């Protein structure tokens, strides 16, 4: 029986993460360039079980240097590329969003970790944001 945690990157580009045996994994995302005071969608995070039900995920973010990370509860459709059985079903999760300070300039590193009860790994995400 496979259990999955799917983490959707902004624009719904998916990074599938199948059942794992190690304790953690670090994932580096491409750099985003943005304007001061604006928001940038970093990732959609959601998980489901073998019955196509939402599995809670926990997200912990470190305070970035030039802004804040926000989590917005949302609903997501399970993509067919991740599960034939659950394809199209809706599950709960979070949108991870960064908001740059109004007077921010330069770059900042956004770091957060994701855990789910159905995967034996903690995923550490890192993304650099260039603020103009």
Image (cartoon, helix red, strand yellow):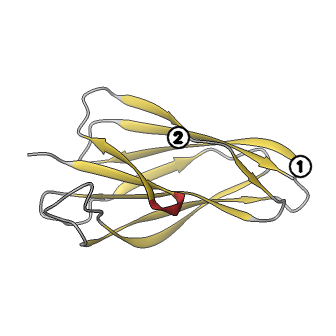
Q: CA distance from mark 1 to mark 2?
A: 22 Å
Q: Which mark is residue 125?
A: 2
Query: Mark 2 Cα within 10 Å, few/some/many (few <14, many 20+)?
Result: some
Q: Is residue 106 above or below residue 54?
A: above
Q: Quadrant of residue 112?
A: top right
* Element at label 1: loop
Work out which residue is located at the far front of the displayed protein and give it: 81
Task: Identify the residue shown where x is 16% and y is 60%.
Answer: 84
Q: Quadrant of residue 115?
A: top left
Residue 96 as seen in the image, left or right of residue 93: right
User: In front: 19, or 31?
Assistant: 31
Disc 1 and disc 2 in contact, CB within 8 angstroms: no
Residue 90 in the image, given as x and y percentages of width and height: 29, 73
* Element at label 2: strand
Q: Which mark is residue 105?
A: 1
Residue 112 as seen in the image, left or right of residue 23: right
Residue 126 in the image, given as x and y percentages of width and height: 58, 39
Task: Identify the residue shown where x is 18% and y is 57%.
Answer: 49
Query: Mark 1 Cα within 10 Å, few/some/many (few <14, many 20+)?
Result: some
Residue 80 in the image, given as x and y percentages of width and height: 25, 62
Q: Is residue 124 above or below residue 39?
A: above
Task: Looking at the image, tell me whether mark 1 or mark 2 is earlier in sequence order.
Answer: 1
Residue 77 as seen in the image, left or right of residue 126: left
Q: Which mark is residue 91?
A: none
Task: Identify the residue shown where x is 89% and y is 49%.
Answer: 105
Task: Identify the residue shown where x is 77% and y is 65%.
Answer: 38
User: In front: 65, or 85?
Assistant: 85
User: In front: 127, or 93?
Assistant: 127
Q: Is residue 123 above or below residue 78?
A: above
């Amino acid at each position: 029986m496979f259990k999955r945690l799917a983490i959707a990157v902004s624009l719904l580009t998916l990074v599938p993460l199948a059942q794992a045996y190690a304790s953690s994994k670090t994932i580096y995302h491409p750099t985003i360039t943005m304007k001061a005071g604006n928001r940038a969608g970093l990732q959609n995070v959601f998980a489901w079980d073998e019955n196509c039900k939402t599995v809670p995920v926990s997200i912990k973010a470190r305070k970035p240097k030039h802004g804040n990370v926000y989590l917005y509860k949302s609903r997501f459709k399970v993509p067919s590329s991740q599960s034939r059985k659950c394809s199209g079903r809706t599950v709960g999760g979070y949108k991870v969003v960064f908001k740059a300070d109004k007077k921010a300039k330069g770059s900042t590193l956004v770091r957060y970790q994701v855990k789910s009860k159905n995967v034996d790994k903690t995923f550490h995400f890192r993304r650099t944001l260039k603020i103009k």
